[in-house]
């Protein structure tokens, strides 16, 4: 089992957008242990308001695609309208490949399927924060 001191951390601020409290708890604990500041939003509406209220303060957004009120697709477009340079890593266990490809084409920085495995999650976050597009190992070309 990997310990958190072997995983790449950082000092950036990450907005986690997810409507499941166990996901919040896992991500908040894991990411703060690695040095990140974590802001939480339980739906897309809250995410847009938090992003708007913190201009220049949020380094990336980890965005669940399936949520009440305002889903991931609409939230992504609203965030892009606020900040065309926003770094968004999409995440879901239930979303069509077409939706993912559409958002990647519109500037999303990658897609991370659920459930999250900490080493993969941390690599994805570091890739996005460092300006690289995240691709799951073995999935560099989508059919």
Image: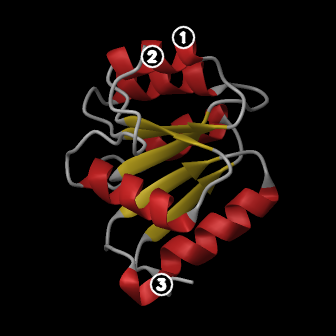
Mark 1 burial class by Cα count in 10 Å: few <14, some 14-19, many 20+ = few
Marks 3 and 2, how far apart in space? 32 Å
For numbered disc 2, what is the local secondary structure? helix
Residue at image location 43% in from the left, 29% down from the top: 79
Confirm or deny contact between disc 3 and disc 2 (CB under 8 A): no
Question: Looking at the picture, does residue 138 appear above or below residue 7?
Answer: above
Residue 86 lies, in percent from the top left, at 32, 36
Q: Residues within 10 Å of mark 2 (few under 14, many from 20)?
A: some
Q: Position of residue 74 (x, y in %)?
A: 57, 18
Residue at 54% x, 60% y: name it.
39
Depicted 21 relative to depicted 65: above or below = below
Which quarter of the picture shows residue 107? top left
Q: Which element carries disc 1, helix, strand or loop?
A: helix
Marks 1/2: CA distance? Answer: 5 Å
Q: CB under 8 Å between callouts 1 and 2?
A: yes
Q: Residue furthest left?
A: 131
Which residue in the protein does label 1 denote?
A: 98
118 sits to left or right of 65: left
Which residue is located at x 79 percent, y 30 percent?
68
Q: Quadrant of the N terminus?
A: bottom right
Q: CA distance from mark 1 to mark 3?
A: 34 Å
Q: Is residue 56 visible?
A: no
Res 4 label? 3
Dot label at residue 101: 2
């Amino acid at each position: 089992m990997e310990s958190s001191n072997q995983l790449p951390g950082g000092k950036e601020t990450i907005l986690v957008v997810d409507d499941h409290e166990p996901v919040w708890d896992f991500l908040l604990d894991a990411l703060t242990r690695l040095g990140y500041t974590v802001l939480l939003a339980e739906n897309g509406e809250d995410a847009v308001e938090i992003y708007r209220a913190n201009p220049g303060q949020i380094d990336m957004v980890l965005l669940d695609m399936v949520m009440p009120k305002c889903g991931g697709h609409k939230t992504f477009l609203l965030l892009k309208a606020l900040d065309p340079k926003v770094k968004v890593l999409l995440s879901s266990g239930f979303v069509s490949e077409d939706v993912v490809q559409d958002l990647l084409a519109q500037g999303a920085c990658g897609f991370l399927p659920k459930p999250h495995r900490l080493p993969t999650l941390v690599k994805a976050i570091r890739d996005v924060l460092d300006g690289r597009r995240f691709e799951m190992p073995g999935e560099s070309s989508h059919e």
